[in-house]
Image (cartoon, rainbow, N blue to C red):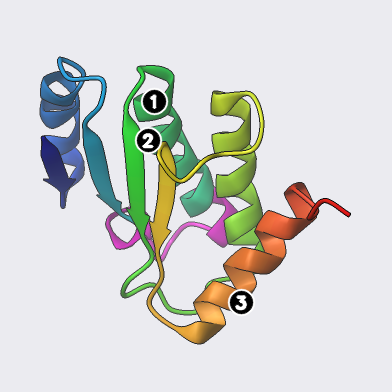
Amino acid sequence: MVLAYSSHCRFEQALDQSMSNAMSTVHINATDYIQPHLSVVDCAIEIGRVVTKVLKEGGSVRLSFRGVRGVSTSFCNVIIAAVADALGGRPTSDRFDVDIDSALQRQVYQRSFQAHFPPST
């Protein structure tokens, strides 16, 4: 079962449905949580809250950065830290994955991910 969310209103209802199947993948669009009156960190905290709720209930998340402009390491750091906390360590792609819009977003995300989880030597 794959569920997609495009608004806060549908999130809670669809989340209840998704939890009946712990192996479901919840698709979350970061753009739905970007608010111009909030700081980048505050927006990332809200995304982290939504993502961790799904993860703590046993679901999987695919977070889309598509359409997000000016992704910063601070933004990524907050989300990655929330995911790591919810999963008790390094996230695996079967529980948490991201959909990246550009090479620059990928570079920023990877830099943040490696800061949290340095590659093994």
Q: Which amino acid does label 2 sit on?
A: Val
Earlier-in-chain disc, 1 versus 3: 1
Q: Is residue 50 magenta?
A: no
Q: What residue type is labelled 1?
A: Lys
Which residue, given by chain and number where applicable, does mark 3 sit on? 107
* Residue at the outermost front position: 121
Q: In this view, does 30 lie above or below 89?
A: below
The residue tagged with tag 1: helix, strand or loop?
Answer: helix
Quadrant location of the N terminus in the rendered image: top left
- Label 2, label 1: how far apart the Cα atoms are: 5 Å
* Residue at the outermost bottom position: 103
Which residue, given by chain and number where applicable, does mark 1 sit on? 53
Which residue, given by chain and number where applicable, does mark 2 sit on? 50
Q: Is residue 85 above or below residue 57?
A: below
The residue tagged with tag 3: helix, strand or loop?
Answer: helix
Residue 94: x and y in percent read 40, 40
- Label 3, label 2: how far apart the Cα atoms are: 24 Å
Q: Where are the magenta residues, as a range?
A: 30-42
Residue 50: x and y in percent read 37, 35
Residue 54: x and y in percent read 34, 28
Q: Which of 18 and 14 is in front in this view?
A: 18
Q: Is residue 38 magenta?
A: yes
Quadrant of the rendered image containing residue 82: top right
For label 1, count other residues whose C-alpha is less than 10 Å away and answer few (under 14), some (14-19) or many (20+): some
Q: Are the residues tagged 1 and 3 within 8 Å (C-beta)?
A: no
Earlier-in-chain disc, 3 versus 2: 2
Q: Are the residues tagged 3 and 2 within 8 Å (C-beta)?
A: no
**Which label number is shown at residue 17?**
none
For label 3, count other residues whose C-alpha is less than 10 Å away and answer few (under 14), some (14-19) or many (20+): few
